[in-house]
Amino acid sequence: MKELVELVTVQNAVPPEAVPDDLASHPVLRSQIRLPTPAIRTAFDILANTALQRAPGCCFHAFPRFGKTSAIEVLIEQLAQSFPEMPMYSINAVWHPRFSETIYMGELLSGCSHVMIATGKFEVRRTRLINYLWTQAKARSTDRIVMFIDEAQNWHEAELTMLRDVTNELAKHHGVQLIAVLFGAPELTTLRSTLIQSGRIDLIGRFMIQQYEFHGITRLDELVTIMGYYDNADISEYPAGSRRCYSEYLLPLAYGSGWRLQQEGPRLWDQFRKSAQGSGGLDDVGMLWVTDSIRQFFLDQIEFDHPGLTGTSNDWASAVLRSGFKDSLGVTYSA
């Protein structure tokens, strides 16, 4: 499921008509930013080693709104820089009340951007997928392909068994290693236990022998680093070629007088901490709660931009409240 949220659907956001036309399309206000978070950097190191070792796959799990889908997009971009010859695809694992091998193969073809996703029976689609992946690898003179599986908790034994068969076919007849990277909710740990209990060690060894937790922001210094990216045109330039960072574009007068979003980090972290006091304390904040709170702060401050602007505790309390972070505690996860 895409995590790109249109401005008009942002929870409790300022109405679009209250935002100047030249700001309404800004990535921050449209929730379209992609930043190298600590969790993404850790995942990149794991995946780079997985690719180098030609391991069959690995598995990441995280609570909702921890930025898994966004992370896949960033990881594909980063891995492409280190492994430019290696084809990479992102598959959205869809839950169906009843498993259909034909539909399943069509969804794999769709995720691999094949033009013929809805024609032919199961065996035809399966052959089409294997030939397509082989020709993509051959065209790039590589023997490795990475397939990201988003929302992987929606798959079960049948889907993983068929993916295993596809990887076996590619390896045996074409010498191509398909590396499957599963990203999903914590239910993936339950799936792993179920597969172990049912004796499907082949699937565990293939896809889930290495299972990692995909963290959010766990410390103040990590939050400060993330907020500093908004102040750095090398990471957050907008528009392209302007050499203006997100902070400068959204609050030019404050930025010009020396204000930086990074300075607001302790105030934001303090509000997350206060929100989590009744839920066992603050251990981990999902990245999307962070970006939602920062977006709310910018939306509130745009019309009041002035030299010397500094956020207050009340500003950040309001931003965190309207992000919905507190409402999620004890429901989607425990901080």
Image (spheres, rainbow, N blue to C red):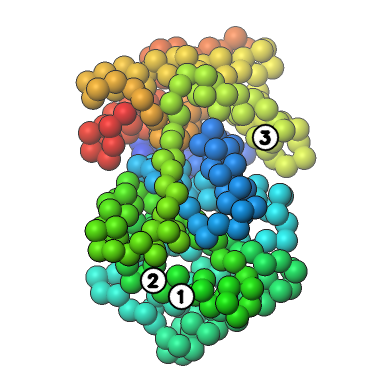
Q: Secondary structure at mark 2?
A: helix
Q: Residue at x 39, y 82 (%)?
A: 102
Total labels drawn? 3
Up-down: is 88 above or below 135? above
Tell which circle, 3 or 2, labels the residue nearer the N-terminal end: 2
Q: Nearer the viewer, residue 266 or 22?
A: 266
In this rendering, the label closer to the viewer, 3 or 2: 2
Residue pointed to by mark 1:
165
Return the x and y of residue 234 as percentages of the image width and height.
72, 33
Answer whether labels 1 and 2 touch (C-beta < 8 Å).
yes
Amino acid type, callout 2 = Thr
Up-down: is 46 above or below 129? above
Answer whether labels 3 and 1 touch (C-beta < 8 Å).
no
Q: Residues within 10 Å of mark 1 (few under 14, many from 20)?
A: few
Tell me the quarter of the image containing the N terminus: bottom left
Q: Residues within 10 Å of mark 2 (few under 14, many from 20)?
A: some
Q: Residue at x 67, y 70 (%)?
A: 137
Return the x and y of residue 111 as percentages of the image width and height.
51, 68
Apparent side of residue 193 relative to residue 304 in the rendered image (left or right): left
Apparent side of residue 79 relative to residue 95 in the rendered image (left or right): right
Q: CA distance from mark 3 to mark 2?
A: 40 Å
